[in-house]
Amino acid sequence: MSELKVKNAIISVSDKTGLEKLAKGLHAQGVRIFSTGGTSRVLTEAGVPVTKISDYTGFPEILDGRVKSLHPKIHGGILARKDDPEHLKQMEKNGIIPFDLVVINLYPFEEVIKKPVTTVEEAIENIDIGGPSMLRSSAKNYKYVCVVPDPGYYDQVLKELEDKGSISYATRAQLAMAVFDKTSYYDGLIGSYMHSEIVHRGVDVFPDSVSFYFKKKQDLRYGENPHQRAAFYTNPDIRVSGVAQAIKRQGKELSFNNILDIESAFEIVKEFDTPACSVIKHTNPCGAACSHSLVQAFKDAHACDPLSAFGSIIGCNRKVDGDTARAMLAAGFMECVIAPAFDESAMKAFSVKKNLRILQTGHFVKEHEVYDYDMKRVIGGVLIQSRDRQDVSGGEIVAATVKKVTEEQLDTLLFAWKIAKYVKSNAIVLAQPSDAGVKTVGIGAGQMSRVDAAFLAVSKAGDRASGAVLASDAFFPNPDAIELIAKHGITAVIQPGGSIRDDDVVAACDRAGIAMVYAGMRHFRH
């Protein structure tokens, strides 16, 4: 395909990075530059001759700048096929100049919605209309127009012009594809933001079609297994604390599996207001605990299943100090620690393990988190649901057995219930009070039957099962699991209820002297 000579260029940019160098380079090549208000002022101050688009079109910028470039003399000059005699005739008749180069970047919608406080009105005013229109027009007509959607491409375009006096077809095609990626991402951000605002205000609507756009944060060495390729993409509109927004303070690059485990580790500890710690393997907790101090919470969480904790991911909901860091290092090999912050003594302690990944999320405030979808992929489709954010309080549970739970048992049951939400179903969680808080002592995860999950949990707990309480993520279909846990000294149970054999399960608890309450909801996690 032919090279493109550049005679006329439109430049209209929000991001002024590299603008002066580009414009001066184009002017040196004899290119006539047309521009909108803000950009034209910058160019004029830099000594670059520029024609205002409003002077060219004969139509002023109006509506506080909402309408600047939406004019036939702009889009006609961009979209015309320069080898079509009829197009050329119409351009001449209407006084339309053919544009060869279009340099556009968009209003900073992404940056605006990232701010700690952004009103919907402010976000709306940063939805670009003319910019995407010019970008798409130029990209559609890349055979005759070179479009530049980002300052990162300025040097490439200038070098071609300076070396050859023209821009290659290959470059024009490359930049056109970049435009469609950029405008798709931009529109996706807007759609996601606007939908999240609607949902955040209580209207939980699943539209007839959905689009999700994410920006690549990093390439990964491989996926779940070395023969699988992978990358990590994030959505800046989802303004929550977690692995997607975390900063890596030290350590190796994150793996695909690391990221999934880190997500689980941090989501668990975000559930609690007191110092909390979780120990994760393969997205399931090996242990979790709350205590008066983070170091004690870690010790209690790790003690639940120290064998499985080898190579684990640690989640914390408080700043990690030196004592906690040293306790973690003494406990054995771990892959990563994620927390809101780390003090200098903690970072000094961790520095002896250069490969240990340290992720810092910054402060989080749960009630300010925006709505996000939970999605699970199937071949050829995707399942979309709201996140499992619902929980129960002590005042909402219903006593099912003759024996009633004590206040201490209730607090421990509610802790175990929160942990069960993050355990793959079928899930059984055993917990006990500790000297300064509450901790898990046995977890049965991902089993095909509930009695198997219960068996696994009491087996891991050993003697610690005696006196413990139990949380089950779904109802007991039969009394067999109750009969099993009664032999190991379980004193109280929380479960959703709702089985056709609830009466049999309650009767088994009454025979064993176990107190049981219904949560009235379940926490399946597949």
Image (tube, rainbow, N blue to C red):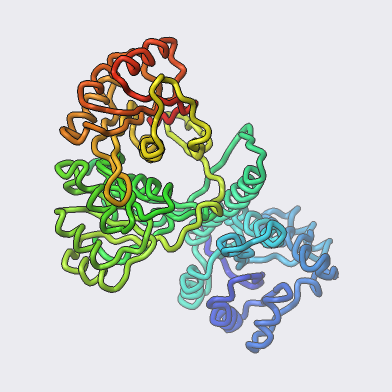
Which of these two is toward me, 416 or 96?
A: 416
Which of these two is toward me, 76 or 46?
A: 46
Q: How many marks?
A: 0
Residue 290 location in percent, x, y?
34, 49
Q: Is residue 500 left or right of residue 85?
A: left
Q: Residue at x 19, y 48 (%)?
A: 311
Res. 228 in view? no
Is 37 situated above or below 299? below
Q: Residue at x 20, y 25 (%)?
A: 488
Is 262 situated above or below 425? below
Which of these two is toward me, 349 or 517?
A: 517
Q: Is residue 380 left or right of residue 359?
A: right
Q: Is residue 423 left or right of residue 172?
A: left
Residue 133 location in percent, x, y?
68, 56
Residue 386 location in percent, x, y?
53, 36
Res. 440 in view? yes
Q: Residue at x 31, y 58 (%)?
A: 294
Residue 249 location in percent, x, y?
31, 66
Which of these two is toward me, 313 or 166?
A: 313
Is 358 situated above or below 227? below
Q: Quadrant of residue 149?
A: bottom right
Q: Residue at x 58, y 56 (%)?
A: 142
Q: Quadrant of residue 407?
A: top left
Could you tell me which quadrant the C terminus lies in? top left
